[in-house]
Amino acid sequence: MTTTPSASAGVSGVNPRAAASSRSSLAGRREWLALAVLMLPVLLVSVDNTVLSFALPEISRHFATSGTTLLWIVDSYPLVLAGLLVAMGSLGDRFGRRRLLMIGAAGFAAFSVVAAFAPTAASLVAARVGLGVFGAMLMPSTLSLIRNIFTDRNQRRVAIAVWAAGFSAGAALGPLLGGVLLEHFWWGSVFLLAVPVLILMLALTPAVVPESRDSHPGRVDYASIVLSIATMLPVVYAIKNLAKGGPLLVSVTAAFIGLAAGVVFVVRQLRRDDPMLDVRLFTVRAFSGAVLVNLLAIFSLVGFLFFVSQHLQLVLGYSPLDAGLVLLPGLLVTIVAGLAVVPLARRLPPHAVVSVSLLFSAIAYAMIALLGEGGSAGFLMVAFVILGVGVGASETVSNDLILSTVPAAKAGAASAVSETAYEVGSVLGTAVLGSILLASYQRNLVLPSGLDTEQAGRSTETLGGAVEVAAQLDATGASLLRDSAFHAFDSGVTVTSGIAALLMIGASVLAAWSLSSGVSRTRPALSARPRASDRT
């Protein structure tokens, strides 16, 4: 008896047409090459978030900057970047994500050169603002292009794993690259790092990265763009100002302005037929949970790097390059964990994978809190490896959930939300944990007698200031100040790590609750209100 194709299909349970469709949706060599090209700006933008910290002492000496100016050199880039991400994601959906990516790459390269050769501190601040503007064009474009290039869910998980690993790896790689460059070149070299990589990206992108955009974008909503900036920028500034010990009134005023603009933004999005950002997404438990996981994972990474880099260099006396090498195994584990979690995510529910991953971050902080005062480089290396497991795995799954929640046409806006969570998490990691660490340091520091007012102020302000002041004292005074400062700093690290461990446990519980709702139920929220273009 001859079996017909239809009968064969029925016996095997496989629909040939569905199987053919599945095969046709699989990405090929060109798509994976496109991913490799898209990783270039991801690495650069994430490296730029951390590499500057190693150049700050030389920049401060070169320009003889005030403390306020130095803070603006650091803060202007992430402030502008965070403020523009949602707006740039929406513009990419409307005008073309590849086009916006290339504009961003060209502008980022140009302003990197301007920053490297800035003649004054004010021009360096202006260049950092320009880097923030064009950096905001790069990041949402990369993730939204991945969403549209990789239509197969399993392949997209792998691609997002590579993307998330690249972002986390870039943040951890920044100190290592900064150490290498500053041992051989001047401070501007940390900015020139971007130029050859972006030139290569501009040459390859038109050949391998396909253009994509929203087929029904609606009109450009300039008022919403302004409101999104007016929401994010003041709120991020308020957090940073509060963390740096700035005037409380300034932080409260900035936060109030941002929150008020945010309320107007939300109301406007709910009333529009074609909103720039579908805020109804945040009523979906899985989406909101994934965004918070993104924020808290990067919070844990940046906060850890903040105090470990100081301990390695100032307490243990490592050079920037050697300190970066201590962090290298954790960097590699972050990448491996992000990729290794993909097959697990196919078999296990996302809430289980993410909640367990975040517990790794909690364990790393608990190790520091319980055993880490005066810890050796090897101990810190092990703790960072454990942290890398948690960050790499949780970032891959949460980003996949964020992008799976929205239609491909709105990938830019969803990507911008994910990127904003990254930036806010980065700000909070330094601001919250840094503020707790500073308060504990100042409370436990005992100054030796004989210091003048300026020396006492510098010693109390930061550990680095105490080390510099100690170099000006006699042997006895220097030993007393260094020992007291190191003990006060490590005591602060213990307190900070204990609080961070509790936060990560809370994040794990949050993930277990919020992500258990799944993604399949999120689709109706996106189509609750039809667009005007759909009704005509």
Image (cartoon, rainbow, N blue to C red):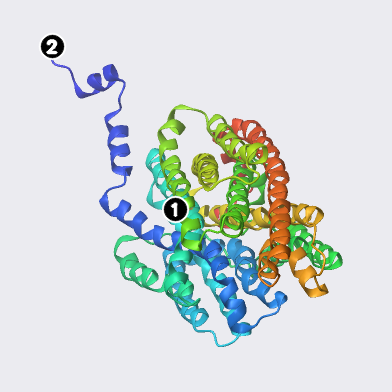
303, above or below 388, in the image: below
291 or 435: nearer the eye?
435
Residue with the mark numbered 2: 1
Residue 271 in sight from this viewpoint: no
* Side (left or right) of 68 relative to 302: right
Q: Residues within 10 Å of mark 1 (few under 14, many from 20)?
A: many
**What's the mark number on residue 451?**
none
Which quadrant, please, contains the N terminus? top left
Amino acid of disc 2: Met
50, above or below 299, in the image: below
* Label 1: which secondary element: helix
Residue 137: percent from left, percent from top: 51, 67
| Residue 80 quadrant | bottom right
Residue at x 64% of width, y 48% of height? 529
Residue with the mark numbered 1: 166
Amino acid of disc 1: Gly
| Residue 360 quadrant | top right
Which quadrant, please, contains the C terminus? bottom right
